[in-house]
Image: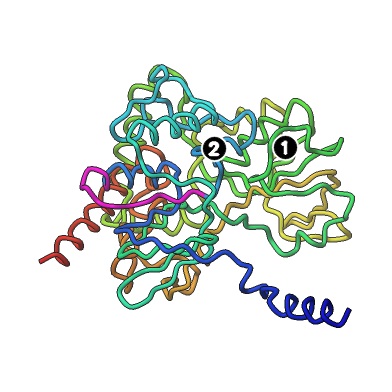
Amino acid sequence: MQLEAGALQAAGSQVPSDEERRPALREEHVDVVVIGAGQNGLSVGYHLARKGVKFVILEARERVGDIWRSRWDSLRLFTPARFDALIGMPFPAERYSFPTKDDMADYLEVYAKKFSLPVRTGFKVDEVTRSGDRYIVSAGQTRYVAGHVVAAASSYQKPKIPDFAASLDPSIRQFHSGVYKNPGQLNPGSVLLVGASNSGAEIAMDLAATHQVWLAGRHPGHIPVAYNGYFAMRLVLPVVLRIVFHRLLTVDTPMGRKAKPQQLSHGLPLIRVKPQDLDAAGVRRVSRVAGVRDGKPMLDDGQLLDVSNVIWCTGFRAGLDWIKLPIFDDSGRVKQYRGAVEGEPGLYVCGLHFQHSTSSTMIHGAARDAGYVADKIGERMRAAAR
C-alpha cells in the first residue's frame, strides 16, 4: 500500500498545469493580414492577389456573406444591381432590380471562390498590436506576424444605444436595429423606432402592416423622385451615386469636407423611402427622443409615448477598440487619410463611413478605396525591397 501510494503521489506531481494544457500558439508570417471578408475585405484581397502579395483574410463568421445574412428578413439593397458588383465580377441580377440581403451574401461567397481569395472563416481577431516594425494579429490560438494590416470590418460593429435606455419600463421590449429580423420579435402593441434615417424608415415600413409605428428623429432629407422609376434609375441614381456621392462629396473637395461632419452625425438622406410613403403607411413621425420619464420614452417636447416596443435605429460605433494602438482621435474615430492610418505605417482601414467619400460605405465605393489601400501597400513593399 505504501508503494502504491508513493507511485500515485509521484504521478500526481506530473499532472500538467492549466497553462501547460493550453494549445501552443501557432505563429504564421505573411505580408498582409486583412480583417473582415465583406465587400471591403474581398476588394482589398482582389487587388493584393494581382500584386502577388502573400496575404490572408480573416473572417469571424462561419461563412463569407454571413454579415448580410444576419440582417432583417425583408431587407433589399438600397442600390440597384448595376451598382452592387465588386471589381472583376458582375452582379448576377437584372441591372435595375434591387437584390435581397441573401443575394448579396451569396454573391460575396461566390466572389471569394471565383478569385481563390485566401479567406479563413471562424477566425475572430482578438487584438492587433505592434512589435518593432511588424504587426501582431492575435486570433484565438493563431498569431499572425505581418508588415501590413488592413482592418476592413466597416463602421458597423458596435450598436450605439443611449444610456437612458436602461430606464425604460422592463415590460417594454427593446433592442437595436442590428438584431431586428421581422415583426414576430415584437410584443403586441405599438412600436417606437428611434432614429429616422434609412434603417429606421425601412424598418418602419416593414412593421406598419402589423403594428402602430412611431418614427422619432430629425428628418434627414430624401431623394425627391420616384426611386424605382425610369427617370430615377437611368439618370438620377447614376448622377447621385457615381458623381455626387463618389466624386463631389470627398475629403478632397470643399463641398465634401463641409458635408462630412453632417453625414457622420446624422447619416445619409432617405434613399428609397419617402416621407409620403411613411404617411401613407400610417407611420406617425415625431421629434427626437430626449430621455425617459416614468419608464416611458419622452420626446424633446416633453410628450410621453405609451409603447410596447422600442427599436434603437441609432447607428453603430466603429468597434475597432481591439486595435491596441494610439490611432483614435478625441471622438474615437480613426485618424486616417483614404485608409492610411496616421502615425502607423503599414496599418490601414477600409469601409469606414466617409473614409474618402460618401460612397466609402457603399458597395460601389469599395473598389476605389480598396485599390488605393492596396497600391499604398505595394509602394511600401517595393520601397522596403530596395
Is any part of residue 245 visible from this angle? no
Q: Is residue 54 a member of the stretch shown in magenta?
A: yes
Query: What segment is highlighted magenta in the picture?
Result: 48-59
Viewer-closest of 83 and 340: 340
Q: Give the Cα separation between the discs numbered 2 and 1.
A: 29 Å
Q: Is residue 39 a member of the stretch shown in magenta?
A: no
Determine the residue located farthest toward the left in the rendered image. Answer: 386
The local crowd at label 1, few if under 14, some if 14 to 19, many if 20 or more residues have their Cα within 10 Å, is some
Q: Report the amino acid beneath label 1.
A: Arg
Viewer-closest of 30 and 274: 30
Residue beneath disc 1: 284
Position of residue 225 measured from the top left corner of the image (x, y, whole percent): 45, 27
The local crowd at label 2, few if under 14, some if 14 to 19, many if 20 or more residues have their Cα within 10 Å, is some
| Quarter of the figure with the N terminus | bottom right
Left or right position of 366 against 101: left
Position of residue 142 measured from the top left corner of the image (x, y, whole percent): 48, 61
| Quarter of the figure with the C terminus | bottom left
